[in-house]
Amino acid sequence: MNWREVNFDGIVGPTHNYAGLSYGNVASAKNEGLVANPREGVLQGLQKAQHLRSLGMTQGVLPPHDRPHLATLRSLGFTGSDSKMLTDAWTSSPALVRNISSSATMWTANAGTISPSPDTENGKTHFTPANLAAMFHRSIEHETTGRVLKVMFPEGEYFQHHAGLPGGTHMGDEGAANHNRFCRDYGEAGTALYVYGRSAFDVAKDLTFPGRQTLEASEAIARQHGLRGGKAVFVRQNPGAINAGAFHNDVVAVSNKNVFFYHEEAFEDPAGMQKQLRSAAPEIDFEFVEVPSAKVPLSDVVKSYMFNSQLLSPPDADKMQLILPIEVSETASTKAYIEELLASNGPIGAADFLDVRQSMRNGGGPACLRLRVALSDDQLSAMDANSVLDDALVEILQDWAGRHYRDRVSADDLGDPQLMEECFAALDELSQILKLGSVYDFQR
Ligand code: SUG
């Protein structure tokens, strides 16, 4: 049976903008007020997906959600027609409208946690949409995400779905961005590493920025998914890294199969992390590529997003390959480090630098834009919807974005009912292209 890792990239939404919504996310705060170009954003994302396809990777997409999210306005007491609700909400609180209009669903590393079938007791692939409780604009994602995942991966022989965790920020869960799966090969039993920022019931006095993921949330997901005995390891992110702007662990670490590429300051106890992984999975020949602060300071990690890269095993390559944001080649320390890494004859043999600047300005690099799912041939065939890319679908999506997306959206445009109508028309058509059925909350 052939297995592969499929990357499902979030399609940048038509309301993509810079509203400075994410406290603790340095780029989001720094770029608040810039004018965004959603059309360029969606095309940059599709280009990245095409690049992975050119390396022989299987590539899918996940749709943007309906924004502005009128269902949230309705649940907060707004009434009347769509445009009346939007206008009333904008008059009452532009900040609220900015939150319910964010295109943050494009960062699908936060869509959910996936445990592939070789890792679970009942032999099914388990999905839990992340509740994203730490940020209001993201806390409204998980119900739609859950519906989309259920359409794409129908419940039954192969796939099992769970609801997002209850419990608000105590059970704060940010999905795959704080989860790594190690294995010898994608179809073999793996071991999960869950990285948390704090404990649910303690005050984390060492954090100045939010620790979005709690230990208890990670433990709950490992339980729900019925991970095979002893195959889950829980470690704390270094609070210093969170305070420096690594609001998710995938800003300071990335893994693939047996390789873990991470920064010296990523974990509270890096030696303990290595030890726990080795003892949970003695069959895996771990390769830890720990990058010292003396070579790349944490501030350059956060600025360049060097670890927010995709670490891939292209089918025809004998070494792994990094997909990095172009900012890494523009930052002296990270550029030099990647050159040294490629020359070192280690497990990583190639690196490409891609332009995803529209996303990067909101703190989302290549790794934030993708959700990884390890799938067998049979599981891939059991998928529903039309979300796995071929050239024809990419062309259709490029044409769709060209017709529907604006090339300028600012945070001040979000109260405009005309923009809302454009977004709903775009998503109405997209749900037909991707054969999603009725996953959205708006009515047409
Ligand atoms: O949750 N930014 C996202 C970025 C998510 C990146 N994902 C991963 N690291 N996996 C966030 O902070 C900014 C939106 C704004 O400010 O308009 C935002 O939501």
Image: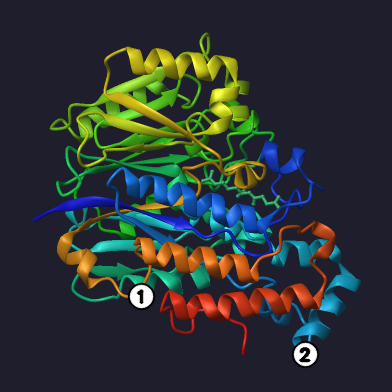
Q: Position of residue 80 (x, y in %)?
A: 79, 91
Indicate yes or no: mark 1 CB to ligand 1 under 8 Å: no
Residue 267 left/right relative to 85: left
Q: Quadrant of residue 282?
A: top left
Residue 380 visible from this viewpoint: yes
Say which of marks 1 and 2 sits in front.
1
Callout 2, which amino acid? Ser
Q: Where is residue 312 in the image (x, y as percent from the top left)?
A: 32, 38
Q: Which mark is residue 430?
A: none
Residue for point 55% across, 39% down: 355
- Furthest residue in direction right, as rendered: 91
The residue pinned by badge 1 equals 385
Quadrant location, the C terminus:
bottom right
The residue pinned by badge 2 equals 81
Q: Where is residue 193 in the image (x, y as percent from the top left)?
A: 34, 40
Quadrant location, the N terminus:
bottom left
Residue 132 visible from this viewpoint: no
Residue 186 left/right relative to 146: left
Residue for point 61% across, 53% down: 41
Display colour scheme: rainbow
Q: Where is residue 416 in the image (x, y as percent from the top left)?
A: 82, 73
Q: Quadrant of residue 399?
A: bottom right
Residue for point 46% across, 81% down: 432
Position of 160 relative to 371 (above/below): below
Residue 74 left/right relative to 272: right
Q: Mark 1 packing: few (<14 Cα in 10 Å), some, or many (20+)?
A: some
Of 263 and 275, the residue lying toward us: 263
Callout 1, which amino acid? Ala
Residue for point 49% across, 26% down: 266
Q: Mark 2 packing: few (<14 Cα in 10 Å), some, or many (20+)?
A: few
Of the image marks 1 and 2, the number of the one nearer the N terminus: 2
Position of 336 relative to 324 (above/below): above
